[in-house]
Amino acid sequence: MDAIIISIGTELTTGQCLDTNASWLAEQLSDHGARILRHVTVTDNVDHIATCFREAMKEADMVIATGGLGPTPDDLTREALAIALDKPLETDQAALRQLEAFFARLERSMPPANVCQAMRPQGCEILPNPRGTAPGISHSSSSGHFFILPGVPSEMRAMFQQSIEPLIAQLATGARTARSRLLVFGISEAKLGELLSDLMNPGRSPSVGTSAADGVISVRIVARGESESDARRLLAADVDEVRSRLGDSVFGEGEDTLADAVGSMLLEQGLTVATAESCTGGLIAKHLTDVPGSSGYFIEGFVLYHNSAKTDRLGIPREIINQKGAVSEPVARAMAESCRGISGCDFSISTTGIAGPDGGHPPDKPVGLVYVGLAWEAQTEVRRLLLGDHLTRDEVRDRACKTALNMLRLRLIESQGRP
Amino acid sequence: MDAIIISIGTELTTGQCLDTNASWLAEQLSDHGARILRHVTVTDNVDHIATCFREAMKEADMVIATGGLGPTPDDLTREALAIALDKPLETDQAALRQLEAFFARLERSMPPANVCQAMRPQGCEILPNPRGTAPGISHSSSSGHFFILPGVPSEMRAMFQQSIEPLIAQLATGARTARSRLLVFGISEAKLGELLSDLMNPGRSPSVGTSAADGVISVRIVARGESESDARRLLAADVDEVRSRLGDSVFGEGEDTLADAVGSMLLEQGLTVATAESCTGGLIAKHLTDVPGSSGYFIEGFVLYHNSAKTDRLGIPREIINQKGAVSEPVARAMAESCRGISGCDFSISTTGIAGPDGGHPPDKPVGLVYVGLAWEAQTEVRRLLLGDHLTRDEVRDRACKTALNMLRLRLIESQGRP
């Protein structure tokens, strides 16, 4: 199956937005054994879009286009498809009713501009949008399949998974790919490269590669086989090998987060956690509550941004703050212990640090200095992080948050091992 | 000047790597007044690349391609250009000497595989690579300019800035571009399209386009003029016009956030804020403290995830929670008022809702129902949001957070207006 991916939008051709849709779609299609001939990105010009559609239909068995399905005058994809197919645009009554129902559920009246979103060229089908107002459009003929999806990534992905993936799975023939992404925190990419170097040899199959982003290292493993079970078997062997070499540094797979890993262990062990954050300003609580069902173990959080809040809410003595500074080991320790006591939780996490870009006092208190505390029944552990002033404010906060969650994760692995 | 951007590499067409080069180049070219006709991404197939080169040369005055200049067998861009131009490949002696010198500086001998990197089609020029081994290639004729740059982003950018940008600045026949992105929250994209429809007519100059992401609508304005000051003047007029039509819905420009807008007004007016979050789980505090200097107005936050925390920390009566439910108007109101009282802040924000995917009880309490409270001296305002179960958990939390910050922003605009 030969495929072409088309992205539509002047915000993309002028570089104002980075297109992530084409890459995501390409990966999905490749996984099903499709050969991607090319991606094309075109401006919001109805003739250019139509020409691009016609050429792609001639060459490929499957064309997927994204973008230009909104309700505003620069959304021209519906019209371009009508031109390319030489069919008039019609209102799809079922789609119109769905649109009206969408607004009714939100207790709003539908703006007149949205009516055009229920239109499609004659002979085309509507693809329902599980996440928004813009329906997609599909057209199938003896020469191939044509799909138009919305440009908003979350809507595009949901529509692809609901309406297109099942069809592709039917169409797919030939070599299959299985892939996995193991997620690692707490060791350097160089160290990881040493541990996995033989597996990463170019030309080896399955292929093993690493990439680092936001403090997390991804180990990507791609296996190819003659059948799906073949590919999966090869993949599973490599996943096991990598996991055994990296041990507890691996915290998850795919789209897992450290908070997911922590959450499932807390639930399993029937334990609870509370947070007392200064420099991370609510980020740890946010990460913990990103996880559905986190109300089963996350009880409450304090964001103690001002020093008065540290004293008023957790009773951190003013003298310690004055003597040692708010960014200090004793303050992180007292925050974690007091938060654990007040909340009555099994664990408590604390942070205090200098996120920058200002407020650093080198050499003792540079930007990027963070103390992370973890209190549990037996003990309180405090780690001093020197994250470096080459990191941005966001990065300092992100690494402090991930280090805190990882400390809790490692502690939970240990407590899991106890009788 | 019409331009086409071509990215070469099977790792791009299969979605294993995200292409950031095309977007970066597009922005540079647009800034110099070039009109980008399209981006194309092709596989490492010499015939496909050559065909793509030929078509692009026919249509555009300038073609920039990236990738496929390395020393390995899948680097086919040199050969493809030779086919497209119908010229033989030759070794460039100066480039070969530079390659040899590059390795000598690293005290290594040059691997034989690298020799091919000094080759170029007859009649082409070599572009030096300030950052690596792969030289670029250029070809100019009466019909236009063709450039090939390496795929490694840092090498590509350095080569563009050194060798291509000066030429483009010369070629730019006066036409310059100035651009702005206004950020809007609180009205629908359809409504916005109605308000701006005449400005968005295709072909109008400056061009005005909209795109929506994460609940925020961007209005992109691109003005072209004969000189930079000309373009800026045209841009400023349109920015003023759009701002006057959209009023207080515009919260910023460029990369501004709602928290930035709120923060600068709080600082200016010498006011403080605290948060009491349930369903947003620390996200509002996180957004507020994303802003450097937020310690000047953000004092503290409570994350009251468990109902016991709502009662223990803020004294929300258990009876209200039992009678009305934790997700209710009176609880949001009591949370905001109590948080304001305890913290002593001028403003307090509260949220309570059902972020999903589970926990909804339609029709009264569906997923996506959120109450957002804002308390200040004179009054407490509570808004009921029906965000809809089509949104993900992340999206429900994000929209609730942005709505809360926007309520505070609008309040601050009002209070600013008071004598």
Image (cartoon, coloured by chain):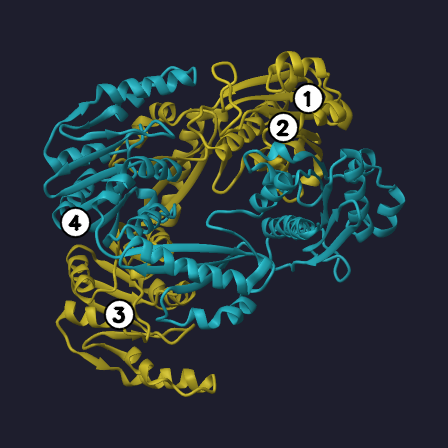
Chain colours: A cyan, B yellow
Residue B19 shows up from this direction: no
**Where A198 sits versus A328, above or below?**
below
**Where A194 sits versus A300, above or below?**
below
Q: Which residue is mark 1?
A: B335
Of circles 1 and 3, the one toward us is 1
Question: What amino acid is at disc 2?
Answer: Ser
**Where B75 sits versus A77, above or below?**
below
Neighbour tally class for label 4: few under 14, some 14-19, many 20 plus, Cα within 10 Å: many
Residue A265 shows up from this direction: yes
- Circles 1 and 2, Cβ within 8 Å, touching? The answer is yes
Question: What amino acid is at disc 3?
Answer: Ser
Q: Position of residue A143 (x, y in %)?
A: 11, 43
Q: Secondary structure at mark 1?
A: helix
Of circles 3 and 4, the one toward us is 4
Q: CA distance from mark 1 to mark 4?
A: 58 Å
Question: What amino acid is at disc 1?
Answer: Met
Question: What amino acid is at disc 4?
Answer: Ala
Q: Is residue A312 left or right of residue B180?
A: right
Q: Which residue is mark 4?
A: A60
